[in-house]
Image (spheres, coloured by chain):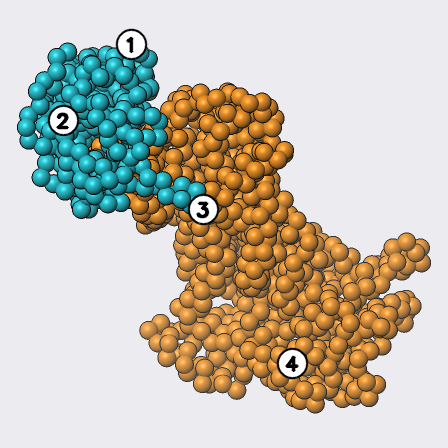
Amino acid sequence: MSKQNPHNHTNIKLKSLCKHYLEAQSNVSIVNNLNAEFKQGEIVALIGKSGSGKTTLLNLISGIDRPDSGEVWIGETLINSLSEEELTLIRRNRVGIVFQFFNLIPTLNVIENVTLPRELNGSNRVVARGKAQGLLQRVGLGERLNSYPDILSGGEQQRVAIARALINDPDVILADEPTGNLDDETANEILELLIAVARESDKTMIIATHSSEIINYADKVYTIHNGNLNSG
Amino acid sequence: MNYPLLHLTTGYIRKHLLQNILLILGIAFGVALIVSVDIANQSASRSFVLSKEILSSKSTHHILGSYSDFDERIYQNLRLKFGVRNLVPIVEDYVNVPVLGGRTVKLLGTDFFADLIFYDNRQSPLSSISEHALTELIAMPGTALISAQLAQSAGIDAGDVVEVNYGSKTLNIKIIGLLNSKSDELSKSLGGLILTDISTAQELLDKVGFLSQIDLLIDGENPQDIEKLNLIRDYLPSGVEIKEKSLLLGSAKSLTRSFELNLLALSLLALFVGVFLIYNIVSFSVIQRRSIIGTLRSIGATRKQIFKMIISEALAIGIVGSLIGVLGGVFLGRGLVGLVTRSINDLYFTLTVTNFTVSPESIIKGFLAGIFAVGIAALVPAYEASRFRPINVLRRSTLEGLFAKSLKLLGFIGFLFIALGYVLIIVSTKSLVLSLISVFLILLGASLLVPICTALLMRLFSLVLSPLGLIGRISPRNIIRSTSRTAVAVASLTVAISVILSVSIMIGSFRSTVVNWLDSALTADIFISMDSANISSQAGVPNEIIEQVTSYPQVERVATVRRILYDSPEYGLFNLVAVTEDLAVENREFIWSESQNNIIWDKMQSNSILISESFAYKNAIEPGDGTVVTLQTDHGAKDFEVAGIYYDYGSQAGVLLISDELYRTLWDDDKITSLGLYISNTKNIETTTELLRSGLSNYSNLMIRSNDNLKRSAIKTFDRTFTVTSALRLLIAIVAFISVLSSLMALQLEREKEFGILRAVGMTVGQLRKMLFLENGLIGLASGLFSIPVGLALSFILVYVINLRSFGWTLNFTVEPQYFIEAVGIALAASIAAGLYPAYLVGKEDVGKLIREE
């Protein structure tokens, strides 16, 4: 898959970002005065050891977690000053998240899992289902619309999660170890799929991963070390 | 349990403190109810013994009239002619003491010299009385002794004159000494007593020449005593009998047995609901730790060790809960003793002593019940935990899948339990215990049917609520998907609400039956009786009042009622009621009668009587021509033909209704218990009542009440009787509430990650809470709806089986829509209220923390 030139305008901007956790009565710095910018359509790989802070950084960008200091901008919105409710709406509409453990809702079937963020928006169910059907077709699950998550394989569940991440046409896709729970062959398939859908829809995508395969696909690769990002 | 497992267990309990506090609370409430009801029942029994057996604790036999006092010459003859020495004459009746707030105490006269035979010198309460006071007591009329305790509570000193009310008389009694006893029991007994010399009592109570009782001490192993006993039996005239004390107490106590058994059943129901709570929390704690348990298994923990770990943990919590429950039970028991004693005073007999006894037996019983409930409830989860395979292979969804597969089997077992309960009711014709067991079987069966019914109902809700959007669609499905948890919440709430509903229907049916019965039984316009706060008083209305009231032009005619508590060897204790005319004549409802209502009264003038349903039930008298009841009259044994069996709810002991004319010819009794007055112009009832009150004001303690007034007073007594039931019903609801709260909390904890995902993908806290409210509401609604058929079935059993077997009364089954609205409303309110805290918590957690993997 060929690399694509990113657009020029900045989609995500991180300024002097810091995050500490209290561990055994001492502060452990996970993100330390981190500055970065990610442009629209850019596919960024975050690699680093376990516990290096990849998930924390993604959580800060998605508003799942809040920084101790610094700023997180998504487009023109400074998200760390938003209320919990506003952050939820940002996640719902502007950020699509793909988790390592898929995190599908077991009580909903495939198509319902995908339409969930759209229906939470109050969108018409028929329209939402139409869009979800298209996305599921795209990720290769057009025949499994009514299956429940617990009967799908790991790879299939992750495909559903990708479709769900795209349903509200977000500006940003954040993927946290999306292949970490899959075998090599399936992992490659999922990675390729993610890259493809991000490229097709011109999304900014940040993938946190252990996988070195990503180097072949990403526009930029950062290593997270001592709470900061190093290029390459 | 070895140290690492113990460490894991204590760590788990610490980490999930709130969950375990709820468990402790649930157990504590269940145990507290059992302990308090047991304390109340035992205290009432003790009060009974203390009230009845005040002084002659060593006596073995009593000589008693079948219905009233007997000639004192019997005592003299026994002593002089037959040489019986160990006997004490007693004259007694109940009086009210205004200075004690109208409390009923027993005025008891005895022969002090004879009475000493029942005590050794140290124990006798008279040992604290000076010789001078004793001489004064015997020589001076109107003198008495009371206990120091009673004197203190009324602010009475030796030498004071105390006013007491007896019948229409006000007596002035001089207290010349205060009784003290080293025996705690005797001190309590004396607290309900005014003690006089026998002749004083005879004068004060208008019983000159009569005795109420003779106490005897007979050695059952001494041939001479046995011979004397036989001589006494042969000598005693008709209507006077010698009875073993233990049998006598048993006969009276048997009256309250059903009442006490019903209270016990209600307390067991609370524990039954508590079992759901324990099961739910223990089962949840196992599922929550399935990964840890799997790991433990993989590193060598045996199944037995895991089983022991879970059971020990539950039992440890059970011990704490039971101990708290025991303490709570003692505290609760204090309140309950008052309510139970009041009900017994209203319904059965007068207790002059309210005793509060906490026996080790009550404590042990409650404690063991708590431990047993925990053991039973934890058994299944502990077994499940021991079956976990090494490493976490059982996912939540797999567990739910297994549970979903067992729904039909559970339902089938539930159906079998219900069928067994039904068979028990049909087969056991009179056993109250078996009927109560069948109630429990039906409740257990219904709770096993709840999971499958919940799943089906939620499918329906899912369709119905689908137009409401995403939340409407997924909420019922969430409940189905967590049936193993939600079904326990629904089942415990269903059981509790159906009990509440059935008890409401039963009380409502009872109330409406009694109201209807009062309307038909009380036809006179004005009633005159003695203002007696106790059911056992023998004091009657002065006979001359009849003449006085008939002189009023407003009074058309007067009917008299003579009611005596009759004790017969064949029929036990019952009320013999003699009436000058059948007050209920046309309205009287019969189960069976040999002829029409208007002809029956004519037959009753010769040799026929009517018996109440409870009398017939208690004595297994079948309806039909030729049935005969034989009673000892003052003129020998007499056979009475039963002309009908009628519905009566005035006495559990049963009523035998006889015409006054027939009664007076057979019994030498000229007393009247009450009068029923018929007024020429019924519009003037209240004014005539007032006229009579002022005209008869020279009689103190006379109660003159209009028909309406008397009915209101009867209904008030009825409502008071059910205060205990209502209190227990409320406590059951509290246990159910804790059970639902714990279920919802457990469910919420278990679904934390799911909530985290929902929030991560864009569900706002408000939407999440809305979803939780809807789920909780659906759980409440399902419980309320299920409780309707279960509650109806239970109320049928309560009304038509338990009540009949407990009291011998058939009630009219009355159902009002408000009961069902209340049931569904309570279920909804309980589940929504129980969901408030979990819903509050759901917005507090950090999304990142929630979605992090275990």
| Side of B148 relative to B739 (left or right) | right
Query: What residue type is disc 1 on?
Result: Glu
Whether pointer 2 and pointer 4 mark residues with C-beta atoms closer than 8 Å, the reply is no
| Whether residue A104 is visible | no
The quarter in which the C terminus of chain B is drawn is top left
Secondary structure state at the residue bearing disc 2? strand
Whole-Å distance between the Cαs marked 2 and 4?
Answer: 91 Å
Q: Quadrant of the N terminus of chain B?
A: top right
**Labels 2, 1: front one:** 2
Amino acid type indicated by mark 4: Gln
Q: Looking at the image, which is closer to me, B325 or B759?
A: B759
Q: Nearer the viewer, mark 4 or mark 1?
A: 1
> Is B220 left or right of B516, judged from the image as shown?
right
Mark 4, other Cα within 10 Å: few <14 / some 14–19 / many ≥20: few
Dot 1 crowding, Cα within 10 Å, few <14, some 14–19, many 20+: few
Residue B526 against residue B39 in the figure, above or below: below
Image x and y of residue B795, in percent:
44, 43
**Taking B141 as reference, is B116 above or below it?**
above
Q: Chain of mark 1?
A: A
**Tag 4's secondary structure?**
helix
Question: Looking at the picture, which amino acid does disc 2 mark?
Answer: Thr
Q: Which chain is cyan?
A: A
Task: Say which residue label 2 marks.
Answer: A204
Q: Secondary structure at mark 3?
A: helix
- Disc 3 designates what residue? B18
